[in-house]
Image (cartoon, helix red, strand yellow):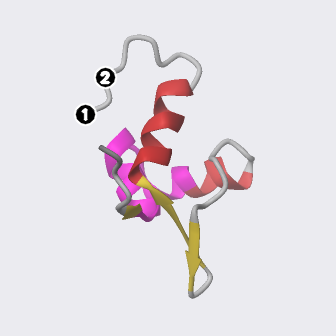
């Protein structure tokens, strides 16, 4: 089953346990996938996109996607 909920910077930050500004920095430096949707100038990502990105991040072998 696919998860098509849209996540904001705040949602992604909570998922990976960092501050929203850290996620913004990841995007600024090209470390975050392109947004799946932009509304009112604000980027959003599907939950599945974020989970796939988390799973592929370097040094992520021992982390669990919760």
Q: Which residue is drawn at 74% across and 47% down?
A: 29
Could you tell me which secondary element the residue under label 1 belongs to? loop
| 18 and 64: which is toward the camera | 64
Residue identifier under label 1: 66
Mark 2 residue crowding within 10 angstroms, few (<14) / some (14–19) / many (20+): few
Instruction: Specify the segment rendered in magenta.
Output: 7-23
Q: In this view, does 8 lie above or below 13?
A: below
Q: Where is residue 58 in the image (x, y as percent from the top left)?
A: 59, 20
Q: Position of residue 15 (x, y in %)?
A: 33, 45
- The quadrant in which residue 34 appears is bottom right
- The quadrant in which residue 56 appears is top right
Q: Residue at x 41, y 45 (%)?
A: 18
**Cβ atoms at labels 2 and 1 below 8 Å apart:** yes
Q: Position of residue 24 (x, y in %)?
A: 59, 58
Name of the residue lying farthest toward the top: 62
Q: Which residue is drawn at 44% across and 65% down?
A: 8
Question: In the visual, does 51 lie left or right of 37?
Answer: left
Residue identifier under label 2: 64
């Amino acid at each position: 089953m696919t998860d098509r909920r849209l996540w904001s910077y705040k949602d992604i930050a909570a998922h990976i346990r960092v501050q929203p500004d850290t996620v913004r920095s990841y995007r600024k430096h090209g470390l975050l996938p392109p947004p799946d949707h932009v509304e009112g100038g604000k980027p959003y990502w599907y939950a599945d996109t974020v989970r796939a990105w988390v799973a592929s991040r370097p040094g992520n072998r021992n982390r669990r996607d919760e």
